[in-house]
Image (spheres, grey):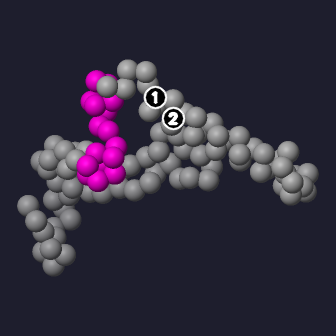
Amino acid sequence: MEVTMNNKDYSLLNKTLIITDMYKTDRDPMVLGGVAIRAEDLEEFIEAVEELATNRFGGASFSELLDNDLDDDTARASSARYDREQIDAMFAEVKRILGRDEDL
């Protein structure tokens, strides 16, 4: 169902979806975006998002990860990035407190 701005009935948008970062950091917001759609469009919407993520951005659906990422490389990479961001933030704060610009 394609709708233009002129005839959009917001009362029909009865499913709210929020995109969050599982590894929220102080620098990055937990909520990254969100949309409201009609509940009856949910399955088609999820399929379209998965197709966009996998085909355009080279991502993987959770079902693909479960079938193929048996060593949890994705989870490890996400965790490592989160850990690195936390360590970098900690060192930045230490440098700020100590008034030092050089590497520690």
> Percent x, y for residue 82?
58, 39
Residue located 28% across and 24% down the image: 67
The percent coordinates of residue 32 (x first, y second) are: 44, 54
Please state if 35 lies on the left or on the right of 104 as rendered.
left
Q: Quadrant of residue 1?
A: bottom left
Relative to residue 87, is residue 10 drawn left or right? left
Residue at the farthest bottom position: 6
* Residue contact at pointers 2 and 1, CB within 8 angstroms: yes
The front one of 14 and 49 is 49
Tell me the distance, in whole angstroms, between the alpha carbons under discs 2 and 1: 6 Å
Element carrying mark 1: helix
| Magenta-colored span | 52-67
The kind of residue on which mark 2 rests is Ala
- In the rendered image of this protein, does residue 12 appear above or below residue 8? above
**63 inside magenta stretch:** yes
Residue appearing at x 64%, y 44% in the figure: 85
Query: Is residue 6 among the parts visible in the rendering?
Result: yes
Provide residue 55's location: percent of width, then percent of height: 26, 49
Q: Number of numbered discs present?
A: 2
Q: Tell me if mark 2 has few (under 14), some (14-19) or many (20+) residues whose alpha carbon lies within 10 angstroms of its own.
A: few
Q: Amino acid at mark 1?
A: Asp
Dot 2: what SS?
Answer: helix
Marker disc for residue 77? 2
The spot of residue 42 in percent (x, y) is 18, 46
The residue tagged 1 is 73
